[in-house]
Amino acid sequence: MGLSRSTALIALVALLLLTAALGARGLNADAIWYDEWWSIYAAGGGPYAVTSVDDLLARSAEGQPWMPPLHALALAGWGALTGWTPAGMRALSWLAGLLSVACAYRLGAAVARDASGLDPRLVGFGTAAALGGSAFVVYYLHEIRVYALHLLLAVLAIWSYWGMLHPRRSRWLPAAFTLSWAGLLYSHFFGALLLGAMALYHLVAVPKDRRWWITTAAMLAAGLLFVPWLIVALSAGPAQVDPVLRANALTPAGIIERLLFMFSNGGLALLAILLVMSGFSRPARAVWFCLIVLVAAAALGNQVIPVISELRYLLAAWPLLALLTGLGTARLARRGLPPALIWGAWLAAGVWGSLNAAPLIVAYQSPASDTYNHSYANAFRALPWPRLHDTLAARAQPGDALAFHRPDAVWAISGVFDFYTVDLPLRRTLLESLPGRDQDGEYLRGASQFLSDADSERVWLAVDKTLPPTFRLDTFRAALTQAGYADCGAVFDLPNMMLSLYARPSAAPLAVFGEGIAVRLIEPPTRDGKSLRLTALWSVDAAVPPATYSVGWHIAAAGGSLLAQSDAGLPAAGSTCTPVTLDLPPGAATLRLIVYDWATGDRLRTLSGEDQITVASLESPR
């Protein structure tokens, strides 16, 4: 049972479209997080621009010398073409992932030509489906990180090596082989696991003929190309193992268990059948050899230097496992089992995992998790940064201040906070960056100093709600009260973030009613769909009799007829913020404000003698 050329082409196109759709769902689905921010910073993206390639390389060498710079260079070029929006930058990984699936088809077909009796198209499609239908792979198609590119280079490294051993008269093959091997190293140091496994196979299992020597020379050339960055990394001194990674480092059994689980989308039984059926032909033995060496080196090496706590570091093993599943699928087809059943089950599990349980695949059987990283579960909670940015971009005014409270792991959001607020016209800070301890009023003085330096009429306070607040939040609110700011209420209050507005009466009032009732517009009237939104700040003198007056916001037609209104009691003495929302009728209208005695209906007059003021003229929306 085999595939015709046209059937294989249609199936591959359908697989690529499926993978593209699954990956594209995440391009703009969530905010960037720390690792993505670092990728943008290393590439000189957006507000972190560098003036030359040398500056970019210097930034990588200084910041993360043990993270080679290929992805930063690729992202710098990609961003220059597509822009620096999160969706645009993520599209680089999306494209690399799709190319990995397409190249995996060619890899599987090339390997199958040396496996007697197997249909190359069946093996090729099975290999491609194993990658394109992997929820774990699909997840990294929307991350501004190196891993999709790393996977592509792993596929190219295996494919080009197989071509070097079985030449098809391509004069460009040695160059492609050398560049793919060097590129894999320049994408991630863990690429050395795959290359080391293939080099060992090349040393012990390949006949020492002319092709062997040419391939060996190309391997050495790839290694020499990587020497400059190796010198950079070594000159930075020994890599310090993160204590968190050390504590969460996987055991050898854990590496194998998670590798098989994540690769198979949780379908361990189907994977076991395919691996057993992959056979013991010469190509299968070569793949098994490289896979076993790679996993053994990772498992044993992790006992010495415990850094592997996440399976993404072993993505280079995915093409080897995919090849074995492709071979197993073709052998089952020879025994009469329709490959469509196998592919259908595999892809169904992958689609389900991508649509419903990406955190399960990433954080390993944690369906309730909303983190991006298993090791730093509390640090990388998903936060609505785009919502914060878009709200402030629409409502912030020049001279405003923004303070953000993150109770713990501040390092994980400091760069992201900067990325999403750098273009806003306000002074900003993290509460945790203000000086002072929780004793003798130290932090209160630090918070008060920030407010004094900002000297803003309005202060926006955003709070990360995923962790319990620290003393800094209440102390900062006390500093706001001490500086005369009134709480204007929550602008939005989501399960994981809240944004509030505070204001104080520093500008000249819009009007003064009676004796001692001043009103200011903290936020001008703004259309919000079919509603009109504004925020007023009332300053009421202590001599004003309480519970006596009401405030009316009225929308009137050109002829004076009342179209909509919002009436409420006058706030108590002191400074009080009142958000106001009115239904906005169609057509041109006028927004007016009155203050009146609610018992008699008598209106208070302004200092200029008017019993109402015109706040704004409302034009009919186009």
Image (spheres, rainbow, N blue to C red):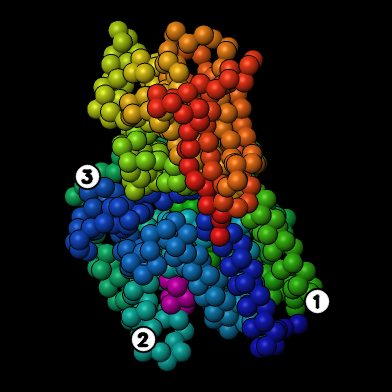
Closer to us: 369 or 407? 407
**Dot 1 amino acid type:** Gly
As displayed, is residue 596 above or below residue 200?
above
Magenta segment? 155-162
Q: Which residue is mark 2?
A: 172
Residue 241 rendering spot, x and y as whole percentages: 35, 39
Q: Residues within 10 Å of mark 1 (few under 14, many from 20)?
A: few
Q: CA distance from mark 2 to mark 1?
A: 40 Å
Question: For numbered disc 1, what is the local secondary structure?
Answer: loop
Question: For numbered disc 3, what is the local secondary structure?
Answer: loop
Q: Residues within 10 Å of mark 2 (few under 14, many from 20)?
A: few
> Which of the two discs, 2 and 1, labels the residue nearer the N terminus?
2
Q: Which residue is mark 3?
A: 237
Residue 294 rendering spot, x and y as whole percentages: 47, 58
> Which of the two discs, 3 and 1, labels the residue nearer the N terminus?
3
- Is most of the magenta stretch helix, strand or loop? helix
Asked whether the residues under the numbered discs 2 and 1 touch, taking CB atoms below 8 Å apart as contact, a structural biologist would say: no
Image quadrant where residue 540 sits: top left
Q: In screen coordinates, is 324 left or right of 223?
A: right
The answer, for residue 516, to whether it is visible in the render is: yes
**Dot 3 amino acid type:** Gly
Residue at 75 percent across and 78 percent down: it is 334
Q: Which residue is mark 1?
A: 336
